[in-house]
Amino acid sequence: MRFRTTSAVLPILTVLLAILALWYAGAVWMNAQWARDQAARAGVEISLSEIVRDTMSQERPVLPAPHQVAAEFGKTVFGTKVTSKRSLVWHGWVTLSATAVGFALGSAAGILLAIGIVHSRAMDLSVMPWAIASQTIPILAIAPMVIVVLSSMGVTGLLPKAIISAWLSFFPVVVGMVKGLRAPDAMQLDQLKTWGASRAQTFWKLRLPASMPYLFASLKVSVAASLVGAIVGELPAGATAGLGARLLSGSYYGQTVMIWAALLAAALLAAALVGLIAAIERVVLRRMGMAR
């Protein structure tokens, strides 16, 4: 068991160290010009070690060093009250609430559409192409329209962001669920027919259980897409709360460290949500006797 744990951790640590090394090298390379410009204005020579030291502590670097992002993340997560508008926990909660509502709406819509597509040839021919076409339109083009239209109808706040989030999240569920509901082969379906099973019984006893692994795989993609949709939904509205607002604020004021800390928070939030779906998947599949 100990050997298995070590063999699983080592590759992760190796990749992490490689990313950090590349990140530090990129920070030195991208921030060095500012250090040289400052030295030229002051009329002094600057050595390589001084350039490296300067690039690690610039206030507004082009690419902040990992320790700068970690310090900003720690300050805004652990060193600030969660009720403060400077807290990443507070901003993360605002984004998470829109993500949860959008994920619920998108998943429900995706499951219902998949059931309709599998059981109706008309829906298969008419809805599926539209579902595919809907994902070819950039979300950055759709988001402002959704915000403006709903705002003109007096709908503001969480719902517009949730709708944008649902727009991104329903498609993976549709595709995964259709694949899963069609997973039973012809012999299994014929066997149920010979037993006189109705269409509803075939769905509940065969198609739905067979679709569970596909559903959970698509839900993991969907929840990450929901988070991206919620963040994108905060951008065109000029929101003052949420991780998207934090990114926007950092962009306005040239605070790249703030932007990267918000990105780190979004990545950790996405990982936590995917981990939660994976934990639910293990419990459900184990109870259904389908655990791998």
Image (cartoon, helix red, strand yellow):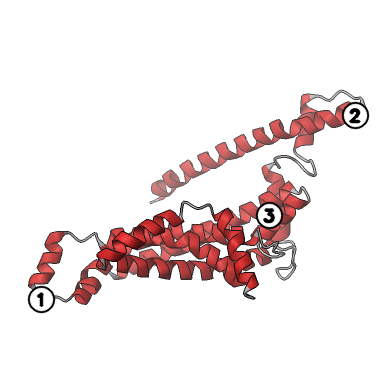
Pointer 2: what residue? Answer: 41
- The amino acid beneath tag 3 is Leu
Q: Is residue 289 in view from this perspective? A: no
N-terminal of the pair, mark 2 or mark 1, is: 2
**Quadrant in the picture for residue 282:** bottom left
On the image, numbered disc 1 is attached to which residue?
Answer: 196
N-terminal-most mark, 3 or 2:
2
The x, y position of residue 241, in whole percent, is 69, 65
Q: Secondary structure at mark 2?
A: helix
Instruction: From the top left corner, tell me how far across and down residue 85 is, in percent.
Output: 74, 66
Question: Which residue is identified by label 3?
Answer: 247
Given the image, on which type of amino acid does mark 1 rest?
A: Gly
| Mark 2–mark 1 distance (CA, rounded to whole Å) | 87 Å
Q: Is residue 199 visible?
A: yes
Percent from the top left, x then y, of residue 146? 58, 64
Q: Is residue 113 left or right of residue 45?
A: left
* Residue in view at x 73 percent, y 50 percent: 251
Residue 98 occupies which quadrant of the picture? bottom right
Of the two numbered discs 2 and 1 in the rendering, the one whose residue sits closer to the viewer: 1
Q: Whole-Å distance between the Cαs marked 1 and 3? A: 58 Å
Q: Is 117 placed left or right of 4 in the picture?
A: left
Q: Quadrant of the C terminus?
A: bottom left
- Mark 1 and mark 3 in contact? Answer it, CB < 8 Å: no
Front-most of residues 211 and 55: 211
Left or right: residue 197 compared with residue 286: left
Kindly identify the amino acid type of the residue bearing the numbered disc 2.
Arg
What residue appears at the point 81 percent right and 24 percent down from the top-left corner?
47
Residue 29, quarter of picture: top right
Residue at 77% x, 28% y: name it.
Answer: 49
> Where residue 171 sits in the image (x, y, percent)?
42, 59
